[in-house]
Image (cartoon, helix red, strand yellow):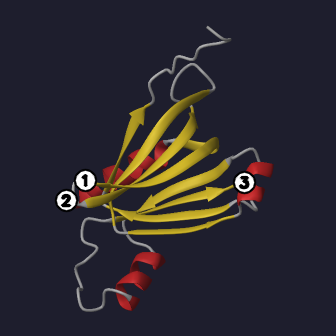
C-alpha cells in the first residue's frame, strides 16, 4: 500500500462526522480466517436526515482494546465525542515492542482506529488493515397483533 493510499484511508475515516454520532452496538466476527470489528453507528452528516444507521466494519483486525463504561455511555446517550485513524501511533509502537518484537514488519499496512465516547463513556482502540461502511437496510416492523 502506497503512502498516498494510507493517507487516503485515514482521511476518509477522519472526515466522517463522528461528533455526537451514536455508538449503538459492537460485534467481533470471524470472517474468512480474519477478524472484523463491526460498529453499529447512527452517523451524522451522511444524508438529509440527522442520523444515518450505518455499520462501520474494521477489516482484518489484529487487536481490539476496549475501555467502555457502559453506564457512562448510556448516561451520555451513546454519543461519540470523536474518532481518528492513524497510520502511526504510540499504541502501534507499544504493541510492536511488547507483543510482536520478533516480527518487526507486523503492522505494515495496518492502522490504529480510535473511537472516543463522550466522557465517561471510554474508548475503543482497533488495529485493522482497512474499513468500510455498510448502510443498514430499512427494517420492516409489524405493529400490533396480526
The residue singled out by tag 3 in the image is: 73
* Residue furthest front as drawn: 146
* Residue furthest right as drawn: 75
- Disc ID at residue 5: 1
Near mark 1 (Cα within 10 A), the count class, few <14, some 14-19 or many ≥20, is few
- Disc ID at residue 2: 2
In this image, 43 relative to 59: left or right? right
Near mark 3 (Cα within 10 A), the count class, few <14, some 14-19 or many ≥20, is many
Instruction: Locate residue 107, reporting x and y percent.
Output: 28, 73
* 141 over 125 or under it: above or below: above
Q: Earlier in the sequence, mark 3 or mark 2?
A: 2
Residue closest to the eye, 82 or 52: 52
Count of picture labels = 3
The local secondary structure at tag 1 comes to: helix
Q: Quadrant of the C terminus?
A: top right
The mark closer to the camera, 3 or 2, is: 3
Instruction: Locate residue 133, reporting x and y percent.
Output: 39, 39
The local secondary structure at tag 2 comes to: loop
Q: Earlier in the sequence, mark 3 or mark 1?
A: 1
* 78 over 116 or under it: above or below: above
The mark closer to the camera, 3 or 1, is: 3
Q: Residue at x 47, y 78 (%)?
A: 90
The local secondary structure at tag 3 comes to: helix
| C-alpha span from label 3 to label 1 | 34 Å
Residue closest to the eye, 128 or 17: 128
Amino acid at each position: 500500500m502506497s503512502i498516498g493510499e494510507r493517507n487516503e484511508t485515514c482521511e476518509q475515516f477522519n472526515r466522517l462526522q463522528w461528533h455526537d454520532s451514536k455508538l449503538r452496538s459492537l460485534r467481533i466476527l470471524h470472517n474468512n480466517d480474519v477478524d472484523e470489528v463491526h460498529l453499529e453507528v447512527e452517523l451524522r452528516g451522511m444524508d438529509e436526515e440527522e442520523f444515518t444507521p450505518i455499520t462501520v466494519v474494521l477489516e482484518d483486525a489484529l487487536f481490539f482494546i476496549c475501555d467502555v463504561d457502559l453506564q457512562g455511555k448510556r448516561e451520555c446517550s451513546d454519543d461519540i465525542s470523536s474518532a481518528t485513524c492513524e497510520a502511526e501511533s504510540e499504541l502501534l509502537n507499544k504493541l510492536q515492542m511488547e507483543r510482536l518484537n520478533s516480527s518487526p514488519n507486523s503492522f505494515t499496512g495496518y492502522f490504529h482506529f480510535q473511537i472516543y465516547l463522550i466522557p465517561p463513556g471510554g474508548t475503543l482502540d482497533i488495529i485493522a488493515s482497512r474499513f468500510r461502511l455498510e448502510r443498514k437496510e430499512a427494517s420492516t416492523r409489524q405493529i400490533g397483533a396480526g
